Image (cartoon, helix red, strand yellow):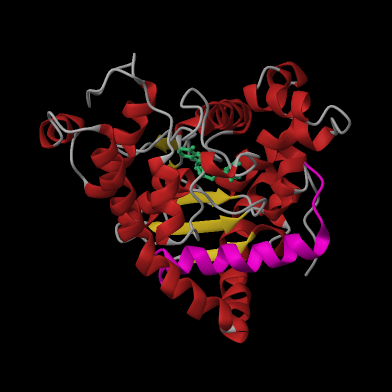
Amino acid sequence: MIDGKKVIFSGMQPSGDLTLGNYLGALKNWVQLSDEYMTFFCVVDEHAITVRQDPATLRKRVRELMALYIAAGLDPEKNCIYVQSHVSCHAELAWILNCFTYVGELQRMTQFKDKSAKHADNINAGLLTYPVLMAADILLYQTDVVPVGIDQKQHLEITRNIAERFNNIYGDVFTIPDIYLGKAGTRIMSLQDPLHKMSKSDENDNATIHLLDGRDAVIRKFKRAITDSEAQIRYREEQPGIRNLIDIYCACTGKTPQETEKEFDGKGYGEFKIAVGEAVADLLDPLQKRYKEILADKSYLEGIMKTNGERAEYYARKTLRKVQKKVGFVEKIR
Ligand code: TYM
């Protein structure tokens, strides 16, 4: 709790162009929840360097992601939107929590196994301890709720385990956070392979809707989306392609899968795919317009990074001091 409000923390990596999955699984929910909570939305650049990044591109993407958060509807006056590396407490707490996390539990994480396989030439220690930094992000702000897509569930579980382990030794230091999953869109799948998650790093451009794709590109990609030959719009496991399109449609329109089945009963896939494409393009249109304006205003963005970085630091430092005292560090004379 901060100022009588429950706390939300979430973040995204500036490691590629954001996808419709990032938006429907996370960002859209952040905007919906932001009024009721004290919120911290972080651009997690420290997480991004667990795989090699080009420095100039990373810097550019951090600014772009800040602009995208705002363009999506997060008011930076009310929401603490900031850059992770501007608040050194994240790395400091992560070190301490590393000493309360077992190598075995980190080696069991799905993302570590996946990323190690994908980047076999660079299985660095950061890739292994990634979830500890993520735990530090969340626990620094005494977070109650973490809105994310379902792929982050395991990371939330380890965060809770680390926090409980620490609290069991030192008393109630950390709030134990809960995951928040939206009603629809918690796992958007690739348009070309509906058994795999839509991802920033997919090499096939037709598989992914990027948040800055224009209307024509969006509709073209949906038209090409892989479906099946059953020719019926039903929300069933056996039809993963159609199921994914229904999920996307529902997340964009607020309709339920049952309502969607009814709406398109007896209609062809071609018509349905265009309707999904239109719904997505309608949602992205206003965001893209605002994004361009915000990104063009460099000093505005820098001002926000500075003020919000300081605000985040204030709250983070409080928790960090408490933790340092608990583990036995001598207080720094100020
Ligand atoms: P990242 O950058 O991979 O993704 C950002 C958010 O988007 C969600 N997401 C999806 N949701 C639905 N369908 C998809 N296909 C899809 N792809 C991505 C993710 O679940 C996430 O919510 N480890 C995190 C970043 C992070 C973080 C944190 C999150 C660092 N510290 C603390 C929350 C709290 C990550 O890599 O997300």
Seen from the viewer's position, the closer of residues 133 and 71 is: 71
In the visual, does 56 lie left or right of 187?
Answer: right
Secondary structure, magenta segment, majority class: helix
In the visual, does 2 lie left or right of 231?
Answer: right
Seen from the viewer's position, the closer of residues 29 and 294 is: 294
Determine the image quadrant of residue 240: top left
Determine the image quadrant of residue 88: bottom right
In the visual, does 206 lie left or right of 280?
Answer: right
Indicate the quadrant containing the C terminus: top left, top right, bottom left or bottom right: bottom right
Q: Answer yes or no: is residue 314 visible.
A: no
In the visual, does 144 lie left or right of 268?
Answer: right
Q: Name the residue located 46 percent from the left edge and 35 percent from the top edge.
A: 191
Seen from the viewer's position, the closer of residues 87 and 43 is: 43
Q: Answer yes or no: is residue 303 visible.
A: yes
167 shown above or below 15: above
120 shown above or below 308: above
Residue 135, position as x, y percentages in the image: 61, 39
Q: Name the residue located 33 percent from the left edge and 16 percent from the top edge.
A: 237
| Quadrant of the displayed image that contains ligand 1 | top right
76 shown above or below 2: below
214 within the magenta span: no
Q: Name the residue located 65 percent from the left edge and 22 percent from the top edge.
A: 109
Residue 299, position as x, y percentages in the image: 62, 86
72 within the magenta span: yes
The number of numbered badges drawn on the structure is: 0
Q: Name the residue located 72 percent from the left edge and 29 percent from the top edge.
A: 115
Seen from the viewer's position, the closer of residues 85 and 61 is: 61
Residue 238, position as x, y percentages in the image: 34, 13
Bounds of the magenta span? 51-78
